[in-house]
Amino acid sequence: MPTLVGHRGAPTRRLENTVVSLLLARDQGAEAVEFDVRATRDGHPVLLHDRTLERFWGRPELVGELTLAELRELRAAEEPEARLPTLGEVADAVDLRLVVDGKDPDLVPTIVEVLRRHDALSRSCFIGEPGVLGEVRRVLPDAEIILSWAGERPPPLELLDTIRPAALNLRWAGLSDETYRAVRELGHQIWTYCVDDAEQARRALRLGIDAVITNDLPAVAPVLAGVAEVGR
């Protein structure tokens, strides 16, 4: 059975990249949660995918233009009680495997230090783009790294030798059997993002995907657990 990863928590039910969303993902069957990390103006790592605060928080600024204290005052229009959390708060509150997508290579040392200080480094892995993951490998030589890759062909061997990923995270949309086989031949585990309905989940099972990242845990979890296979 593939590892089930909640993409930014449970974003179809609660505001993405918030503690309540990450905890709901756990309740919906996720074994791990993936989330994005950026830095405030005063250097605190917080959870946010977008470069700006516009989409959910109604502010046009970059997250790096506001201090943590200023971010504490923000309220999301669709979920006013939710707030933008720090990485330390998430490490303390969410007792799952943490799949950390840092958006800035300069922030990597701080991310590692916060996870270590909150006793969460041993249950964390790092996912994302080569530029950031190269810094992860430099700062944390033994890190578990999941390299996201959208190309139809596998990454260059030089890049794989530098990053040394445990797995490749392949974009589900357009993932061909040929690409899947080519990556398997390199000897890596395969993750995929995002698998969001039962039919996609059944194909992921047939392929033998090692970890599935999803926005819709209730649709996917029963299939991966075998519950939805009865009578198919």
Image (cartoon, helix red, strand yellow):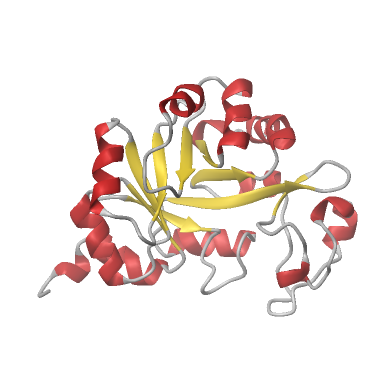
- Specify whether 183 is left or right of 88: left
Vertical order, 190 against 223 (above or below): above
The x and y percentages for residue 159 are 48, 28
Vertical order, 11 against 161 (above or below): below
- Specify whether 226 is left or right of 231: right
Q: Which residue is situated farthest in the left direction here?
A: 231
Residue 227 in sight in this render: yes
The x and y percentages for residue 206 are 18, 56
The x and y percentages for residue 164 are 45, 25
Nearer-the-camera pick, 220 or 177: 177
Total number of numbered discs in the rendering? 0
Residue at the spot 88% in from the left edge and 43% down from the top edge: 42
Quarter of the figure with residue 8: bottom right
Nearer-the-camera pick, 150 or 12: 150
* Image quadrant in which the C terminus is located: bottom left
The x and y percentages for residue 17 are 62, 59
Residue at the spot 83% in from the left edge and 60% down from the top edge: 72
Vertical order, 168 against 23 (above or below): above
Vertical order, 159 against 22 (above or below): above
Nearer-the-camera pick, 214 or 162: 162
Residue 225 in sight in this render: no
Residue at the spot 57% in from the left edge and 64% down from the top edge: 21
Q: Which residue is situated farthest in the bottom direction here?
A: 78
Quarter of the figure with residue 181: top left
Residue at the spot 10% in from the left edge and 75% down from the top edge: 231
Quarter of the figure with residue 80: bottom right
